[in-house]
Amino acid sequence: MLLLFINKLMIMLLALSTLNLVRHLYFFIQSFIVARRGESSKYSISGKQVLILGFSVSYIIMCIVTGVTL
């Protein structure tokens, strides 16, 4: 029972990590497109956001390599 709960929690964490990565990719691409048009746009994120993004990317890579289950 506890193992099932932990597996569901890990899948939810994978979904949230993926959404976080997609969010930052969207803002980066949006900033890149605006900059190509000649307008001044800068993509900047705080130190806390960089840390969370790093954890998200590392968790997604770990799930790809090892799988989601325990």
Image: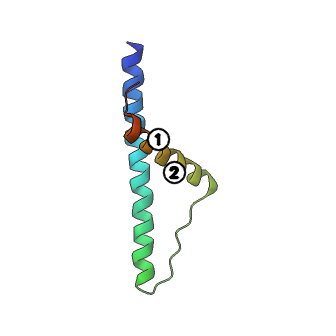
Quadrant into which the C terminus falls: top left
Q: Which residue is mark 2?
A: 53
* Residue type marked 2: Leu
Relative height, residue 66 to residue 61 (above, below): above
Q: Counting residues from the N terminus, which is met first, the one under dot 1 or under dot 2?
A: 2
Instruction: Give me the residue at 52% from left, 69% from top.
Output: 43
The answer to which quarter of the image holds residue 6 is top left
Measured as percent of width and height from the top left, residue 37 is found at: 40, 85
Give the crowd class for mark 2: few <14, some 14-19, many >=20 residues within 10 Å: some
Distance between the alpha carbons at the discs numbered 1 and 2: 10 Å
Q: Which residue is mark 1?
A: 59
Measured as percent of width and height from the top left, residue 15 is found at: 37, 41
Instruction: Give me the residue at 39% from left, 55% from top.
Output: 22
Helix, strand or loop under label 1: helix
Helix, strand or loop under label 2: helix
The residue lying toward the viewer, choosing from 27 and 53, is: 53
- Which residue extends farthest right? 47
* Residue type marked 1: Tyr
